[in-house]
Image (cartoon, rainbow, N blue to C red):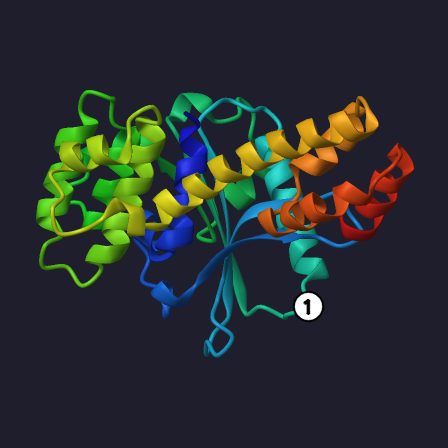
Amino acid sequence: MRRDSIFYKLFKQMPELLFELIEQSVPDADRYRFDSVEVKETAFRIDGVFLPPDDAESKVVFFSEVQLQKKENLYKRFFAELFVSLHRAEIDYDDWGGVLIFGSRSVEPSSSVWYRSLLESPQVFRIYLDEIEQWQNPPLAIEIVLLAMSSETETPDRARALLDRSEQDDRRQDILEMISTIMMYRFPKLGWEAVAMMLDIQDVRLEDTRAYQEIAEKQGQSVRVSMTLMQLTELIGDLSDVIQAKIATLSLEQLDALGKALLRFKKLTDLEAWLSEHH
């Protein structure tokens, strides 16, 4: 399980979690939108950008990176992408912030001399997840971060404690979404009923959570891709790796359309023409 992908899902569901981590009070924190941003005319794609609401009085954009393994070029890439993104942005932001979240200090790049002024500025925050345990009375959102970092044996007890703690919280549905996301990634081989029993959930159906729906959709798409490839192979013969890769990236709606169209295919060029038009 890649824990950094869990963090990006948590940020998507509750963007104010970032501001809890850096202990900053930001106007409209709960209305920020977490997204990935493609920087035009470059090869950059920034996966962790917190975009302020369109009607925010002060538009401050935050760039984030979760790093759980050591990468020596991290600072070089992070700050290059950050400033190119600001240069190419269609919006003139009032300010920016950078948040680097490390599993521990040991996974930071060994050399930071080029970026020392940036790293020491109040615009850049460095968070070390293994040190969060030392925080006194951490907010509920931070406890969810600790859940994502906990061992497999600790996870069920921590998850149940968090659910109990969230009983009177206005964000209970969001909290349930995040906890269920962590559980589904931590225990991918368990069925939904087993996870519900593990969490002692009676008042909520896990099938209604986004975590369930996203994973179910991915599983359904994987099955549909396999079936479509089998049908095409029977109709027109072996498919190249490139063609198979294109089909694997089709949405469920596109796979439905291809399933209807493939009966008219007589040769490989028919499939190639369809993919060129619909991919």
* Circle 1 SS class: loop
Count of numbered badges drawn on the protein: 1
Residue 158 placed where, x, y %? 15, 34
In the depicted view, which residue is nearer to us: 192 or 141?
192
In the depicted view, which residue is nearer to us: 20 or 124?
20
Q: Residues within 10 Å of mark 1 (few under 14, many from 20)?
A: few
For residue 237, which quarter of the picture? Answer: top right
Seen at 42% across and 40% down, the residue is 216
Instruction: Report whether 273 appears left or right of 187.
Output: right
Seen at 87% across and 45% down, the residue is 273
Residue marked by disc 1: 90
In the depicted view, which residue is nearer to us: 31 or 19?
31
Residue 248 placed where, x, y %? 66, 35
* Three-letter code, disc 1: Glu
Residue 279 placed where, x, y %? 76, 47
Instruction: Report whether 35 appears left or right of 227.
Output: left
Seen at 66% across and 54% down, the residue is 85
Q: Is residue 88 visible?
A: yes
In the depicted view, which residue is nearer to us: 158 or 207?
207
| Figure check: 232 above or below 142 | above
